[in-house]
Image (cartoon, grey):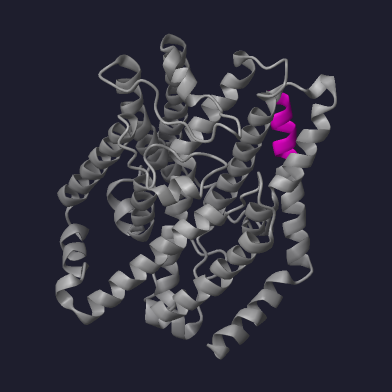
Amino acid sequence: MAGERTPLLGVPVPGPIAGALGIVQRIHFLDNIRTILTIFLVFHHAAIYVARSSLSTPYYNKSDLLPLSLFIVFNKATLYGAFFFASGYSIHLSLKTKSDLAFFVSRTLKTGLPTLLYHEFGPRRKIEGPVPYVVTLLILDYAYLISRWLGSKWSFVSFRRLETRIKDSRAWVMTIVIFSFALVTGITVGNCFGLRLIPFIVRRYYPFEFPGFGAPVTYIIAYIAGINFPLFNRYILIPRPSVAVGLLVVSELAADLSLGIAQDHWKKLWYFIRVTSDSEGGRWFIDPGFNGHTIFFTLWNPLVFYLISISFVSTFASASFTRKDWGRWSRHTYIQTFIHMVPVIYTSRFLAGHSSVQHPIVNTVLSGTAGVIGSWAISLLYVYLGGPALIQKIYDRLRRAT
């Protein structure tokens, strides 16, 4: 029987049979991806908070904030797309053992309802929490479920014929990948040239950090890749761990170094990527046109998204260490997304009063570490006290009531 130690690509169990037997195949590499992404998210938000706070200090200078700005822009191009990939893969796995209606109720009650409560009663300023991400995720989930329902009613709107044709054709898959790359590039070009293709709702609900210039198209592409993970794994991912890790390291170094050199050469690029204050909000591209810094960024953004995403997922899907069960601390990363900014903010404010640790990079590392340790400690305490079991009981009662 499949369980916690089921191999990543073990013997598949058909969805109806798995559901009848109560089998849940835990994919360890997916848990581990979420864990690493959540840690990056904590440090990402710590970097934004510290960098913005540093703008009002008299000792602020570019050299202090340049590494943080590069880190933040890099994450905007890659981090949230990786989260949406993980979410897409989760729905792919869930629908093997759940009906569409059961998944809809589960996602709404377990994810949507807590987020709604957080939005209404939680802290508003500087602590967005996961609200923007969850709202976007629910939209994608509901759209996918509706498309499946429509396809079951009317065959002419079903994607099954297309899926069948694509499944055994590398050429089809590569054509779709090339088209999606061109689409992300086009969206980036359009946003750089002032067309403002990022929808208002995305800009409105990401006030704490203006989204990357590929959003929300990059989110949708990553989500679709997760839903179609078997195809993604078969035709796109790198099967050799050494090659995947090498590409990941080289891609990250090339992305950071090239952006660092480019912003030094083109000063207007620095003014675009630098962290903005609360009063400034998100900044659109500066001086777009057929010039060096515009051409550089319109190529940098989609290349980083694709190279990092593919090499990152390939590493976790192929390396033996990342496919292992990392234990309880990797299975519960939901709470951290709600609470991590609390220890980050209080630690950062405390450190700001001590001259020896006032440097933005030092402050970010220490406050980010506090955010990781503090949020994980609370999460593990919540699990130890039986929180998940209590939530499951409430969910079961609400499901029966509906």
Residue farthest toward the right in the current orientation of the protein: 354
Above or below, 323 relative to 384: above
Above or below, 261 relative to 182: above
Q: Is residue 367 magenta?
A: yes
Q: Is residue 254 magenta?
A: no
Q: How many marks?
A: 0
Above or below, 72 relative to 38: above
Residue farthest toward the front in the current orientation of the protein: 279
Question: Is residue 374 visible in the rendered structure shown here?
Answer: yes
Q: Residue at x 44, y 30 (%)?
A: 246
Nearer to us in this view, 200 or 97: 200
Q: Which residues are magenta?
A: 361-370
Q: Position of residue 181 (x, y in %)?
A: 27, 40
Is 199 left or right of 332, judged from the image as shown?
Answer: left
Secondary structure mostly seen in magenta is helix
Please tell me in which quadrant of the rendered image residue 333 appears: bottom right
Question: Is residue 257 visible in the rendered structure shown here?
Answer: no
Nearer to us in this view, 313 or 333: 333
Above or below, 237 relative to 150: above
Please tell me in which quadrant of the rendered image residue 60 appears: top right
Q: Position of residue 358 (x, y in %)?
A: 77, 23
Please tell me in which quadrant of the rendered image residue 363 appears: top right
Q: Residue at x 52, y 25 (%)?
A: 70
Q: Residue at x 63, y 53 (%)?
A: 337
Q: Position of residue 316 (x, y in %)?
A: 48, 46
